[in-house]
Image (tube, helix red, strand yellow):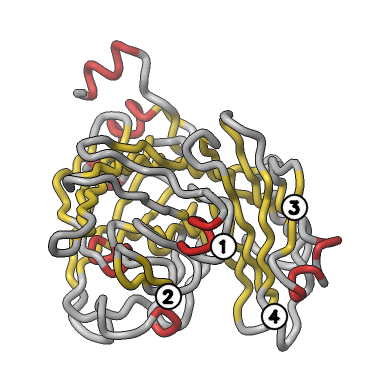
Amino acid sequence: MSVATARKAGLMGELYGRSIDEALGRAGFSAQIAAVEASVRSDGPDAGTRRLRVIAGDLDIELLPDRGLDLGQVRHRGVPLAWMSPTGWPRPGTAGFGAAFGGGLVTTCGLLSFGPPSADAEGEHPQHGRYSGLSASVTRAEVQADAVVIEATVTEATVLGAHLELRRCLRVPLGEGRIELRDEIVNRGSRPVEPMVLYHVNLGWPLVDAGTVLRSPAERVVPRDAAAEAGIEGWAEFPAPVADYPEQVFRHELPSDRRVSAEVVAASGLGIRISFDTTALPAMFQWRVAQDDGLVLGVEPATAATIHGRGAAREAGLLRALAPGSSWGLGLDIDVIRDRSET
């Protein structure tokens, strides 16, 4: 869609107190407002890996093509929203999960397993699956009149085994502080396969600090283990950090077959809203660590209501078959929200 067409259709939003049409007219070059910049890391443990930087008004987004087009750091008006681990993102295959989980706003876990390592007829599944070690083929990177759009495909396959293709579309509307992530998983093989996917949304300081509140659509919240049981009464409010804090994981039991949202809101009023459809993503987990050397709150919509791996999901009857040639649609909307008026 051209700027002229969008103008006539009334689709132009607002940016920096002006309509996007006016903002584009005042900018010397449209890339001041919206752009996609490609680069390759030249040194360090991630040397040779690709980056895409998306600038879309108030949002500055790092995309990781060599990690399935997942989202790295995301800043809103210069404020970092995502938790980043000290491992960074080394080249896929050079380190195990614990030494390569860089965090970022969205890490996709799957496409055949999430949770602890496991094995079944589909083969060996590392912790949280193989997806974050797979490279995407970027097929589109475009600045439109009202949004920035990135599309890519990712394949997870084994010889004579499962053959899944994920088609990812990221759309960032200008002036809205929103990221729209849409995935289509297609079974390209000759037999049914049971995908298993979790979106690991990792939020960090300054959004996450003592007093930050998680507003959940859950009908019930269940602790994973004894460490989580110790914090179940205060699951909704992030605790004050201490030197050593065992990770806590809670399972949120969600209403069925509807659009829901979870919100994480800091005392400052800055917040994130994560919206999804429980028909496709019927489960959600919460992960938190309130430790002095890194505060992290994970909100994790998923296709199966167990965090104990593929074997546990199969035993509980939580895996769904995807027929040859068929597809699933999954996705999230991530919005920056503010509870208080800004000055």
Q: Secondary structure at mark 3?
A: strand
Label 4: which residue?
246
Judge depth for marks 3 and 2 and give the one in front.
3
- The CA distance from mark 1 to mark 2 is 17 Å
Residue at image coords 73%, 59%: 212
- Depth check, mark 1 against mark 3: the one in front is 1
Q: Mark 3 or mark 4: name the one nearer the start of the chain.
A: 3
Please name the residue that numbered disc 1 is placed on: 307
Q: Is residue 150 visible?
A: no
- Cα separation between marks 3 and 4: 18 Å
Query: Is 202 on the left-hand or right-hand side of 261?
Result: left
Residue 339 located left or right of residue 46: right
- Residue drawn 20% across the image and 59% down it: 161
Please provide percent x and percent y for residue 226: 77, 74
Nearer the viewer's eye, disc 1 or disc 2? 1
Residue 241's place in the image compared with 141, above or below, is below
Q: Which numbered dot is residue 221?
A: 3
The first of marks 1 and 4 along the sequence is: 4
Horizontal side, residue 203 vs residue 69: left or right: right
**Residue position marked by numbered label 2 in the rendering:** 101
Question: Which circle's residue, 1 or 3, is located before the other in the chain?
Answer: 3
Q: Earlier in the sequence, mark 1 or mark 2?
A: 2
Residue 24, quarter of the rendered image: top left
| Residue 273 placement: quadrant | top right
Amino acid type indicated by mark 1: Ile
